[in-house]
Amino acid sequence: MKTKILSFIAVIVLMLAMAACDSEWHPAVEKQGQVSLKSMGVDVSDQMNLIQHTSRGSYDISEYIVTIYNEAGEAVHQWAYKDMPEIMTLNVGKYSVNVKSHNVEKAAWNKPYFEGSKEFEVALSKITDIGVVTCKFSSLRVTIKFTDELRALMGDDVKVDVVANDEGRLEYTPATTESGYFEATEGSMTLVASFSGTVKGYFETVTNAFTDVAPGQHRIITYDVKNDNPDRPDEIGKIDPVGGININVGVKDEDVNNSVNNGEEHETPSDRPGNEVFPDDPENPDGPNPPTPPEEDTIEFVTDLAWAPDDNPVQEGKSYVVNIKAKDGVAHLLVKIESTNDKFIGSVEELMPLEFDLAYPGTYGEAFSSIGLKTGTEVIDQTEVPFNITGLVPLLASPNFSGTHSFTITVTDNKQKQLSKTLKFKS
């Protein structure tokens, strides 16, 4: 009997020891959620003029670099866009995704750098949809030009050395047609352009330094000759006349995030004194072109609802529909939901993300369809798409959802034209 009792005690001790070992080697499982990468879209945008509107499967951005960072700023995952998984698991918490066209270089020909980021949060046992990440032009573009009058006097040795931040360097010649792209930094960027070479048989040098340089700009530096034309302003970088020739440097600035067109130039003069473009000057063929007439509207929203800042009433039985017309076909239909009522936001998040693209709904296609929204092929390339939230708006009348609610609709067509408007409801 005593032997049996001792054996029983030994078994208990062994079980406790095994449990202790198991506890030591198998820590508690982290609380986790999932992130949908399949539906993550990427817009490569110059802010006003969308030069590439892209999303998975519709444009080749396969080599763009995608990095997921945790709240501490540590990289936890990185892929080329083409290698991203459709869905991934992360510990509950706050994260950000960074998308960039390539690892930025100090200086390079014809290699604009685009970058964008977006924050998101992973919730317990839920699927988070990141939505659309917008990548903006984030380097400095520099173009060098020579007027025909100066070209007629230049020797074969003329060149312009351009240096940004003492590190990025490119050499331009009169035969250079490409734009150079330089790494840009906020707040402390410098740009130096140095002209050297033979002009009318004499060796000339002139250097100009610019300190008001920022990411997203296009600097067009035009070299001309000074012929004592009283209609022209005093030149910058003036050198002592040799053989009756002065070199005049005109600088034109473009904020690329406002006006550049992926290879097509629309030059605007700098406001800096001495850098004006010379209007009505027959000797300045690079002067400004006549203004381009406004383009025809190709996207239209047709509805009897009021647009923000006006509010729409919340009424049972009323129809809440915006008919979207796009002559060139819809490429993306983005919706962003906002509200001053946290309970309403929480209820929506249980069903769907607060920002989404109905053209590429991902795992939420069924949820969107259940409330009457068109998705996928019902949106892509269609010239007419109804945005119908009649089944959703009456819910705002609930006493629990009192506040101001808005739905921002952004439509981009297949020619990269874009229209965005907001509907507001107060309950």
Image: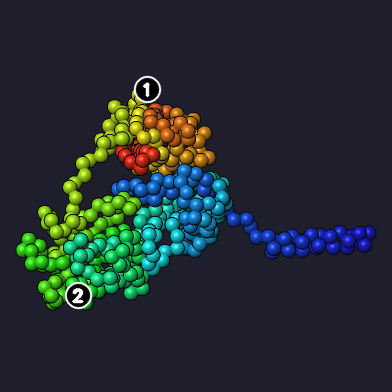
Residue plotted at (20% across, 61% down)? 148
The type of residue carrying mark 1 is Gly
Identity of the residue furthest to the top in this view: 317
Q: Could you say where residue 422 lies in the image, as x and y percent from the top left? A: 31, 38
Q: Is residue 269 above or below residue 210?
A: above
Residue 94 in the figure: left or right of residue 407: right
Q: Could you say where residue 132 lies in the image, as x and y percent from the top left? A: 43, 47
Quarter of the image for residue 163 reads: bottom left
Q: Is residue 50 above or below residue 312?
A: below
Residue 304 in the figure: left or right of residue 126: left
Q: Nearer the viewer, residue 205 or 11?
A: 205
Quarter in which the C terminus is drawn: top left
Residue that badge 1 annotates: 317
The type of residue carrying mark 2 is Gly
Q: Could you say where residue 88 lies in the image, as x and y percent from the top left? A: 56, 51
Quarter in which the N terminus is drawn: bottom right
Circle 2: element type: loop
